[in-house]
Image (spheres, rainbow, N blue to C red):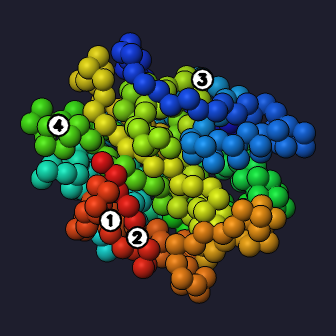
Amino acid sequence: MPSVIRPAIPHYVAPPPTQENLEYADLAILDFSKIGTPEGRAELSIQLRDAMTAHGFFYIVNHGLTQAENDRIFDIADVAFSGVPEEEKRNYLANIKSGGSYQGYKLREYWHIDGGVRDQIEHYNINKDVNRRQHPQAMSPLLPEVEEFAKFNYCQVLQPLLRLFALGLELPEDTFINMHNFTSPGESYAYRAIVHFRGLHSYERPSDDEIKAKQVWFKGHTDIGSITLLWSQPVTALQMLMPDGQWRYVRHIDNALTVNSGDAMEFLSGGFYKPTIHRVVQPPQDQRGYNRLSVIFFAMTDDDVKLVPRVESPVLQKHGIQRRWADDADAPTMDAWRKGRTRAYGLVETKMKENGTEENIVDGIAVKHYN
């Protein structure tokens, strides 16, 4: 990333990796050192397409961010939680219920998880336009670094990925890039702490709550947007639902990205790229007592993009198109889908289905939750 002024802040010390014998998902690893040539992109596009149709998750290595730069981003993410007093956080709450936006803080015990248990997940979200709203005092001098990190994710990771997703459908390479403009209005996020910068802190729960919620911290779900970039961290709690119906853990790899697609990409690809079903559970025994700090980059299309399939794709013409609505005229825009799902998660009643999944309706489309 380009050099910016780096204020002195406390160093975040990550928990040690688990030593427990867990069942991990066997995921593809994409080497982004190959992304610079047409031959390399062609190879990676096939690898990505196979990963997305088999599992929906994959890793990226050699993406261009050094381990030291990675460590600094986690230092910044931790400031949003440990460096901001609780009373100050309340001045920067996200307008979730009425505005359908996660910008700002979502504090703990906002969502209902299961069995009367509420969540212990806190996150801070910064839009790709870091100046869109005010920030806590401790975060303000760090915004230039957050902005540079957002641009790195967008230019060095997201744009190349969008080219690969398009190539996998035999579409022009810029098909999806043209729907994801960094400077356009919208709710893509740069830092979900992280376009969305999100720093996310999961806190330990009382043992009674673990039993009531079946050790689930965040129910099985799909993401709202097109692509999610999760910067790997060592607390092993992320699981994905495999094609055989089993939940398996996602392994931590130092300075790697874990990537999955979301609802928007499913809609745009006519169901070819399935949104990844994943959840967060109680960590293994040797990692309990540690808080889990995550840094996530959520990419969404521009707000006005109508999420209809790219019917011109030769691949979709061959394999068929699956829609979640009766007619393309009924398809939501990114803005409507984002707001509808954001307003509903953990706040509205879900209907239990015979197969054990739960369901609620957003814009006439069934949204499933898995446990």
Residue at 53% x, 35% y: name it. Answer: 231
| Residue, disc 1 | 359
Tag shown at residue 67: 3
- Alpha-carbon span between mark 2 and mark 1: 6 Å
Q: Position of residue 270 (x, y in %)?
A: 64, 67
- The three-letter amino acid code for the residue at tag 1 is Glu
Q: Nearer the viewer, mark 3 or mark 1?
A: 1
The extreme right residue here reads 38
On screen, residue 25 versus residue 116, left or right, reads: right
- Alpha-carbon span between mark 4 and mark 2: 28 Å
| Mark 3 Cα-neighbour bin, 10 Å: few <14, some 14–19, many ≥20 | few
On screen, residue 278 versus residue 190, left or right, reads: left
Q: Secondary structure at mark 3?
A: helix
Q: Counting residues from the N terminus, which is met first, the one under dot 3 or under dot 4? A: 3
Query: Between 231 and 224, which is closer to the camera in this rendering?
Result: 224
Tag 2 near tag 1, CB within 8 Å: yes
Q: Nearer the viewer, mark 3 or mark 4?
A: 4
Query: Between 330 and 347, which is closer to the camera in this rendering?
Result: 330
Q: Position of residue 233 (x, y in %)?
A: 46, 29
Q: Counting residues from the N terminus, which is met first, the one under dot 4 or under dot 2? A: 4
- The three-letter amino acid code for the residue at tag 4 is Glu
Q: Nearer the viewer, mark 2 or mark 3?
A: 2
| Residue, disc 2 | 366
